[in-house]
Each structure stands twice: as C-alpha cells, then as structure tokens.
Image: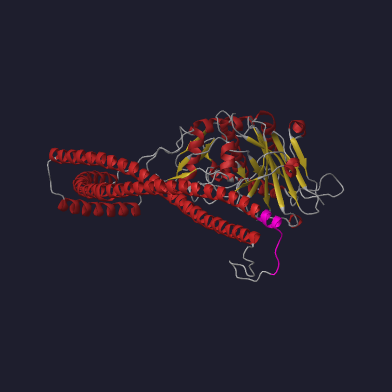
C-alpha cells in the first residue's frame, strides 16, 4: 500500500466539559455496548469529519459540546488533526497530533469541493489517498465531473440504516447518481478515470454554436463585399515599396532629430551663457555706479581740503587785517596761532596726497571695469546673434522638415493600412470559413456513444475476493460469487444477494467493502477506512423469521477481520462482543451503560 490513512483519535470538547475521547488503532477496532451508549453517534461523527454536511443525530448528552477533533495518521507517519464546530462550518487543519494543536497554527479547509481552491476537505483526503485530479463520467452523454472524496465515502462508511439494504452496495443512499457511482467503482478497480472521454454538447451548447455559425456567415458576406480581390504578388510588392519608403523616411527623421538634439543643446548652452553674461554685466554696472559715487566723494574731499589750505594761508599772513572770512563770509572773532595754522595746512596737504592716490586707484579700476564691460557686451551680442541663427535653423529648417516628414508618414501609413486591412479581411474570410467548418463538424448528427461499463469481468477480482472472505467465514452454501450486470449486485451461491435475508445482506455488504479495501491495498491509491455500524446486529435477534445469521458466522467474521484481513484498519460498531479467543488481536472498546462498571458510553457521565 502506497497511499492511505488511518484514524487514531476522535475527541468531543466543550467549555468546562470533560472531553469525550475514542482512540483507534491499526487493524480491527470493535466498539460494543447496549443501545443508547453513543455507538452510532461515533459513526456519525466520523462521517461528519470526513466531509459530511451536518451532524443531525445528536444525543441529549452531546448538545453541550461544541467542537469535534479527528486525529489521523498518513502512511508516511505524519499526523493530522481536523477541527470542526459540531454545528457545522469549515475545518481547521493542524499538521500535528491532537495534544499539540494548541501550539500549532491551523490552516483553513473549506467544507465543500472547490476547483479554484485546493484548500478544502475533499482535496485533502483525495491527496492522502492519491486520488486527486480524477474525473468521472456521470451520464450517458459523457458529461464528466471532478471526483470528490464524498463520491467514495459511501463505499467505506456503512451506517446501520444502510447495512441491510436490498439495493446494490455500489449505490449510495437514494441511488440518484447511479451512472457516476458505477463509474466510481469501475475507476477504483481499473485505475482508469474518464478524463479522456469527450462529452456530447448539450442542446444549449448546440444552439450557441449554431448562433456562432450565423454570425460567421454574416462576417464572411460583409468582408467579401468590402474586399477588392487583388493579386497577392502585387499587394506584396506594394507593401514592400511602402515599407522601403517608410524606412527611408525614418532615417531622414532620425537624422533631423539628431540635428535638432545637437542644435537644441547649443541653443540651451548659448541661452545659459547669455544669462550668465547679462548677470555679470549687471554686477559690473552696479560696481561702476558705486565707483562714480566714490570718485565724486573723493573730489569733494579734495575741494574741501584745498579750501582749508587756502584759508589757512590767508589767515597766516593776515596782511589785510581781515575781519571776515573770504570764503564763507563769516566774522573772524579769533585767530589761531601761525603754528597751529601751518600744522592744519600740513595735515590737509597730507590728506590730499592720500585722496589723490585713492582717486587714482578708483579711476584705474573704472578703466578696467569699463573695458570688461565692453568685452561682455560684445560677447553678449555675438551669443545673441548665434542664438538667433540657431533658432532660425531649428524653426525654419529642422521643424519644417520634421512636419513634412510627419505628413508623409501619415500618407504612407494610411496607404499601408488600407492594403493590410484588405489582406486581413481576405485572410479572415479563410479563417472564418475554417472556423465555421470546425463548429459545423462538432454539432453534426450525433452517433451513439459506447462507454465502458462496469462488467462482470471488471468486477471479477472483487467477486473472487468476496468468495475468499466468505469462505474464511464459513458462509453457508457457498459455491461461487459473481457480479450481475443486470442488477449491478453480486450473486452469492447462485442466489442474488438482494433476495437474501437482512443478516446475510448485512454481512455480504460488509464483505464487499472489505474485499474492495483489500484489493486496493495492492494499488497505489486507497479509498478510506471501512467503518461498519451494526453489520452483525441481526444474528441474535429473536423472531428474525430467517432474516438473521448464525452466531458462528458472526464470530468467524470477527475472526477474519482481526486475523486475516489485509485492510490497514477496520472499525466495527456492534451491540454484541467479539469472541474471547481474539480479544488480544483487536482494539476492543466496551460500553456498559452502567455508571458503576467500566465505561458507560461515548460521552462521559
């Protein structure tokens, strides 16, 4: 066995409640006890955690619990724990044992199969069983659907209400999808799904395709009326000529753009230089203005000092006995000594010498500044003339030429588009005709499709395995086991299975599940754990009117499951206990329905 899983623990939890725990082992697990101890509820919980829609039958003592955990072990010895609210909803998947779930972050799994989201419970179990990405035919038209894990659950999870049914064990409750259910079993036995089948289109698809044909006819007619048929060679020559001209124009355009780039760079450089030079000129003019003011200031100082010297000379001589100053005409009330006047004259003359030197420096500086100003003005005039020439070259030459090329491009592209449009329509007509032919062929008169059905020969290995199991169980009057294509059920000892009593139907139903499980043990895929609710319930019932089975047959069935079965795990829920000689070869969980003796039931009391 390459892919499988086994159940290891089932836990119910509730806030402040003692958890209800069942631990499973590999091999045979038998849970026995009187009615109303929770055996069928255990079955329902397993079914619910394996993708069942709801948990409808809840015993009163379970209503205060709110979560269910199912711990499983894959055959690569990796543990998973599934968590789900008891009232429904999605799943949490923990990649660990149940006791470690509080320290692990779970992954959300959707409760329903979703082809666009692999994180769902069905895909999870299909991957464990190596059954992912399979397709099953569901009707005579060949319509296929993706295999869901729930499509195979009814073959391994057998409730008490179904174990004795008259219908074939191949079909699920109700048998509403018999074609699909037959093909699921055929796939499990042969390993070949129906992915390669091409389904017949339904009537809506056919009408849709006919509508497409009408649209294609209109397009073909419209395009044919608008196309002037021309020789392909002439059209190709015209296209080649146009492409050559377009290529030449692109080269001219590229050359002009290069010229534009070069001259535009020069224009920007000149504009920058002119700006910088004009800024420098402004600074020079400002400096010259300040130099003129300084020069005037120096000249004023010299004039003032010369006046002081002349006045001093007149006063020092004072030959004329001046009573008034000859310069300011103010009355002379007192005269300094000749020494003081001569000292003042000497100071003024010395100051005049300094100012004369500074005035000379200012005049020389102004000469240099004026010379620099003339050079900058000359430079600005030259750059301004060069900028005007470049502007003229760009605007009157390059831009005009580029506009002419653009107009020429439009003409050439328009002509080329007209030719290409004609070619496109001609080619489209051919494609429309080809497409119309394909659609027409796809909706031609349907031929009767013959599919491989579930046959006696296909079911032979299962029939053979059922025979071997029943023989090991000492089933009475056992001659042969075969599969009937008429009833899709088994013929056991030359008697149709559906004609047998309840007890025989129950044990042969369980045998079919075991046979399928053991057969798949030789494959590289699996289908789940066989779980039986009350497969032997009728064997001790009084007044069974021939509906029951013998105690020996029931005990031998237990012995086979415990000792000889090749199934990795089997779970049986029964009222009666297995024989004492095999108790050491199975996991026996016994409910007593007695609070003072052993375990009362599934839910702690």
Q: Position of residue 245 (x, y in %)?
A: 20, 40
Count of marks overlaid on the render: 0
Q: Residue at x 52, y 30 (%)?
A: 461
Occupied quadrant, residue 535: top right
Residue 70 visible to an observer of this rendering: yes
Q: Does residue 285 lie above or below 487 as drawn?
A: below
Q: Position of residue 241 (x, y in %)?
A: 17, 39
Horizontal placement of 118 versus 77: left or right?
left
Question: Which range of residues does the magenta coloring cover?
Answer: 333-344
Can you name the residue that lies furthest to the right here?
596
Q: Position of residue 604 (x, y in %)?
A: 80, 50
Q: Residue at x 49, y 39 (%)?
A: 134
Colour pattern of the rendering: secondary structure
Residue 480 visible to an observer of this rendering: no
Nearer to the camera, 431 or 180: 431
> Is residue 335 inside the magenta stretch?
yes
Occupied quadrant, residue 515: top right
Horizontal placement of 225 versus 409: left or right?
left
Q: Position of residue 569 (x, y in %)?
A: 66, 35
Nearer to the camera, 292 or 111: 292
Nearer to the camera, 416 or 560: 416
> Is residue 1 inside the magenta stretch?
no
Classify the position of the N terminus by image quarter.
top right
């Amino acid at each position: 066995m390459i892919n499988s899983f086994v159940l290891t623990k089932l836990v119910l939890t509730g806030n402040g409640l003692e958890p209800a725990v069942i631990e499973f082992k590999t091999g045979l697990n038998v849970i026995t006890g009187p009615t109303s101890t929770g055996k069928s509820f255990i079955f329902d919980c397993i079914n619910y955690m394996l993708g069942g829609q709801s948990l409808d039958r809840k015993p009163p003592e379970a209503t205060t619990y709110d979560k269910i955990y199912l711990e499983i072990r894959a055959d690569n010895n990796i543990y998973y724990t599934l968590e789900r609210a008891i009232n429904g909803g999605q799943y949490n998947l923990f990649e660990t044992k149940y006791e470690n779930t509080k320290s692990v972050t779970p992954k959300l799994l959707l409760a329903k199969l979703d082809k666009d989201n692999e994180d769902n419970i069905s895909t999870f179990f299909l991957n464990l069983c190596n059954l992912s990405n399979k397709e099953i035919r569901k009707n005579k038209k060949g319509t296929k659907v993706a295999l869901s894990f729930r499509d195979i659950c009814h073959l391994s999870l057998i409730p008490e209400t179904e174990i004795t049914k008259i219908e074939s064990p191949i079909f699920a409750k109700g048998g509403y999808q018999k074609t699909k259910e037959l093909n699921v079993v055929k796939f499990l036995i042969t390993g070949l799904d129906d992915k390669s089948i091409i389904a017949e289109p339904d009537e809506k698809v056919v009408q849709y395709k006919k509508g497409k044909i009408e649209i294609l006819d209109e397009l073909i007619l419209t395009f044919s009326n608008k196309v002037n048929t021309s020789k392909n060679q002439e059209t190709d020559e015209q296209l080649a000529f146009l492409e050559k001209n377009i290529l030449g124009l692109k080269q001219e355009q590229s050359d002009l753009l290069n010229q534009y780039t070069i001259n535009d760079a020069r224009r920007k450089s000149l504009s920058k230089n002119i700006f910088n030079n004009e800024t420098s000129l402004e600074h020079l003019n400002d400096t010259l203005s300040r130099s003129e003011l300084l020069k005037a200031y120096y000249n004023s100082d010299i004039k003032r000092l010369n006046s002081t010297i002349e006045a001093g000379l007149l006063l020092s001589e004072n030959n004329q006995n001046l009573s008034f100053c000859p310069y300011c005409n103010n009355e002379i009330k007192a005269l300094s000594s000749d020494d003081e006047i001569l000292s003042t004259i000497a100071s003024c003359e010395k100051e005049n010498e300094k100012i004369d030197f500074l005035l000379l420096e200012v005049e020389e500086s102004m000469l240099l500044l004026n010379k620099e100003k003339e050079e900058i003005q000359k430079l600005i005039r030259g750059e301004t003339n060069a900028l005007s020439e470049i502007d003229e070259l760009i605007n009157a030459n390059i831009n005009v030429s580029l506009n002419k090329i653009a107009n020429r491009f439009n003409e050439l592209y328009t002509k080329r588009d007209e030719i290409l449009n004609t070619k496109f329509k001609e080619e489209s007509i051919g494609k429309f005709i080809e497409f119309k032919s394909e659609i027409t062929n796809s909706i031609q008169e349907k031929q009767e499709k013959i599919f491989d059905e579930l046959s006696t020969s296909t079911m032979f290995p299962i029939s053979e395995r059922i025979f071997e199991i029943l023989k090991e169980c000492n089933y009475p009057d056992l001659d042969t086991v075969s599969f009937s294509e008429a009833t899709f059920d088994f013929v056991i000892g030359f008697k149709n299975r559906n004609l047998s009593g309840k007890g025989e139907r129950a044990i042969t139903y369980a045998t079919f599940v075991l046979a399928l499980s053991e057969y798949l043990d030789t494959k590289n895929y699996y289908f789940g754990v066989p779980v039986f609710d009350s497969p032997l319930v009728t064997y001790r019932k009084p007044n069974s009117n021939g509906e029951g089975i013998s105690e020996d047959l029931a005990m031998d069935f237990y012995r086979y499951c415990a000792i000889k079965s090749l199934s990795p795990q089997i779970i049986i829920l029964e009222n009666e206990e297995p024989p004492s000689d095999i108790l050491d070869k199975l996991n026996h969980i016994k409910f007593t329905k007695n609070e003072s003796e052993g375990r009362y039931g599934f839910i702690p009391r």
